[in-house]
Image (cartoon, rainbow, N blue to C red):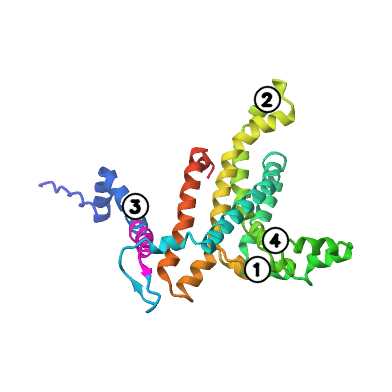
Amino acid sequence: MASISSAEPSPSFVRRLSTFLHKHPALVLILLLAVPLLWLGVIYLGSLGALLLQSFFKLDDFTGLVVREFTLDTYRQLFTQANLDIIIRSAVMAATVTIACALLAFPISFYMARYASSTGKVAFYIAVTLPLWSSYLVRVYSWKLILAKEGVIGWIFQALGLEPLLNAILAVPTIGGPSLSVSMYGTFLAFVYVWLPYMIIPTYTALERVPRSMLEASADLGARPQQTFWRVILPLALPGVIAGSIFTFSLTLGDYIIPGVLGNSAFFIGQVVLVQQGTAGNIPLAAAFTVVPMVIMFIYLFIAGRLGAFEAL
């Protein structure tokens, strides 16, 4: 009797495709990155390119139409005194908020990294990120109520007999106002509150990476706690602080909601962009104003990269 040999079944399409991709890892990488790179290259960078192109046009004052001819007239408008004041005001506020967030975040992050138990770290982490779970607008409008003349802070000053001090603070030119909710103080406090978690998390991450053996070695070599902090802990945690400052600085620089809800009539860059592209219909000027924070952040990121900030992200 002739023996019947059973032929092996041919591999399925999925198996053949898997084998082919296994032999061509470069193709796998291209397929994985195709959609993200398409989004980044076409949608994101393409939109930025279109924005940059719009900034080289100008608005005809007579017809109100955009003249699509290459010109630097729109950028020249940025150097008028009023527009320079807006740029400087936005940059100063962003820098001030960043410094305040760093001063508040460092002790919290240091305690979380060095002294809190495992349960305590979880509790701190939840407490830090808890505000991010609520609506951004709800938090901003809550601060408007807190800082109002009849709000909690005003009531505390009045209960402590410090109302003259509050009135003196509000009487400061430029940054003062009728109440905290319509002054630069209110804008500053809301910015610090909203962006503080973005400073705490990178700072905590950097401090968590500092080896305890390095601190023990510093103590064994006779360094006092202050010397250990300034010469060991702070330099190693600085990249985390700078990484957090990237978030706080950039988010403050471009925000238009907080200055619109709180603060006085002084405009910030984000508000100007909103007004120019919306109410005024001056797309070229709005685009030129948008380029300003991009340039500032490019310089800032270059300096932050040189200081090793991206290693802590």
Give the left or right position of residue 185, taking residue 133 as reference.
right
Q: Secondary structure at mark 3?
A: helix
Prevalent SS, magenta region: helix
Observer able to see residue 281: yes
Of residue 3 and residue 34, the one placed in the foreground of this image is 34
Task: Name the residue that disc number 1 marks.
Answer: 264
- Measured Cα–Cα span from mark 2 to mark 4: 41 Å
Q: Secondary structure at mark 2?
A: helix
Which sits earlier in the primary sequence, circle 3 or circle 2?
3
What amino acid does circle 1 point to? Asn
Task: Name the residue that disc number 2 marks.
Answer: 218
Taking the spot 84% from the left edge, 64% from the top edge, the residue there is 156
- Measured Cα–Cα span from mark 1 to mark 4: 10 Å
What amino acid does circle 2 point to? Ser
Residue 46 within the segment the image draws in magenta: yes
Tag 1 and tag 4, C-beta contact below 8 Å: no
Task: Name the residue that disc number 3 marks.
Answer: 33
Task: Identify the magenta region.
Answer: 41-58
Q: Position of residue 210 (x, y in %)?
A: 61, 34
- Measured Cα–Cα span from mark 1 to mark 3: 46 Å
Taking the spot 69% from the left edge, 55% from the top edge, the residue there is 127
- Measured Cα–Cα span from mark 3 to mark 2: 46 Å
